[in-house]
Amino acid sequence: MTILAAGLLAGFSVHAFGRYVAGSSAPFAVRFCVVLLFAGTAAAAGYQAGGALAELADLEPWADRGISVLVAILTGLASWRDLVLPGNGIARAELQA
């Protein structure tokens, strides 16, 4: 349990630092490397998740690989978009009293 908590704390810390650097006035090369690092690791995780889901569906090997690559691309693009585009999340309407 301690290892899981330490891993989550490290992940949240690195994510917060990455968002800070990507949104700061650091040189373009530094911001680009940080965003590329985040998008690359997200794509690798998406590839593994897509492969696991395709394996559960018991598909042909070529379909398994195709789904893995598709999920990797989508996950990498979502990570890139999340770090590059400005915004503070989803805008929600205020609740009426």
Image: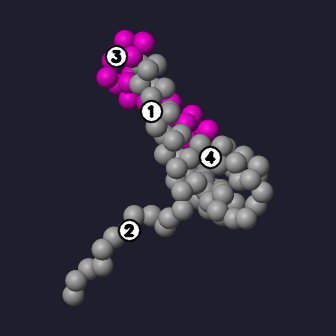
Mark sitting earlier along the chain (1/4): 4
Front of the two marks 2 and 1: 2
Q: Which residue is mark 3?
A: 59
Q: Report crowding for label 2: few under 14, some 14 to 19, many 20 or more residues within 10 A (C-alpha).
A: few
Relative to the observer, which residue lies in front, 40 or 28? 28
Q: Which residue is mark 1?
A: 71
Residue visible at 76% across and 61% down? 26
- Look at the numbered disc 3 and give the secondary structure of its residue: loop
The answer to whether the residues at label 2 and label 1 have Cβ atoms under 8 Å apart is: no
The x and y percentages for residue 43 are 55, 36
Spatial CA distance of label 3 from label 2 is 39 Å
Spatial CA distance of label 1 from label 4 is 16 Å
Mark sitting earlier along the chain (3/1): 3
Residue visible at 48% across and 26% down? 69
Magenta segment's dominant SS is helix
On-image quarter of the C terminus: bottom left
- Please say if 55 is above or below 38: above
**Three-letter residue code for mark 3:** Leu
**Span shown in magenta:** 40-63
Mark sitting earlier along the chain (4/3): 4
Residue 2: in magenta span: no
Q: Which residue is mark 4?
A: 38
The x and y percentages for residue 79 are 53, 47
Residue 44: in magenta span: yes
**Three-letter residue code for mark 1:** Val
Front of the two marks 3 and 1: 1
Residue visible at 39% across and 22% down? 55
Q: Which mark is residue 91?
A: 2
Question: In screen coordinates, is 57 left or right of 8?
Answer: left
Spatial CA distance of label 2 from label 4 is 24 Å
